[in-house]
Amino acid sequence: MAFWSSFMGCAAAIRDFIAPRYRPERHYMRGPGPACARQSGVRPTGARITFQ
C-alpha cells in the first residue's frame, strides 16, 4: 500500500511538471487588501509609529 501511494505521488509530480494545472489561489491575493485596511483605520503590521 505504501508503494502504491508513493508511486501515485511521483506520477502526480511528473504530471504537474509536464502540464501544470491552473491553481488560482497561487495567482490571486487572498484576504483584505491595503485599501480595506485604510478604510477601517487598522495599521498594517510592522508599521512605524511616529511622534510629533
Image (cartoon, rainbow, N blue to C red):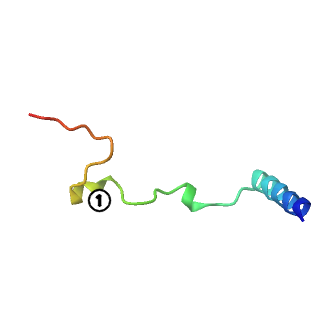
> Residue sitting at 20 percent across and 38 percent down?
49
Q: Quadrant of the N terminus?
A: bottom right
The residue indicated by pointer 1 is 36
Report helix, strand or loop for mark 1: helix
Q: Which of 7/20 is in front?
A: 7
Task: Tell me the quarter of the picture where residue 10 sits.
Answer: bottom right
Identify the image quadrant of residue 23.
bottom right
Q: Amino acid at mark 1?
A: Cys
Looking at the image, residue 52 sits to the left or right of residue 25; the answer is: left
- Which residue occupies the foreground of this view, 48 or 27? 48
Left or right, 8 with respect to 28, comes to right
Q: Is residue 36 rendered to the left or right of residue 52?
A: right
View extreme (front): residue: 2
Residue at 64% across / 60% down in the picture?
Answer: 22
Q: Position of residue 24 (x, y in %)?
A: 57, 61
At x 50% / y 57%, what residue is drawn?
A: 28
Neighbours of disc 1 within 10 Å: few (<14), some (14-19), many (20+): few
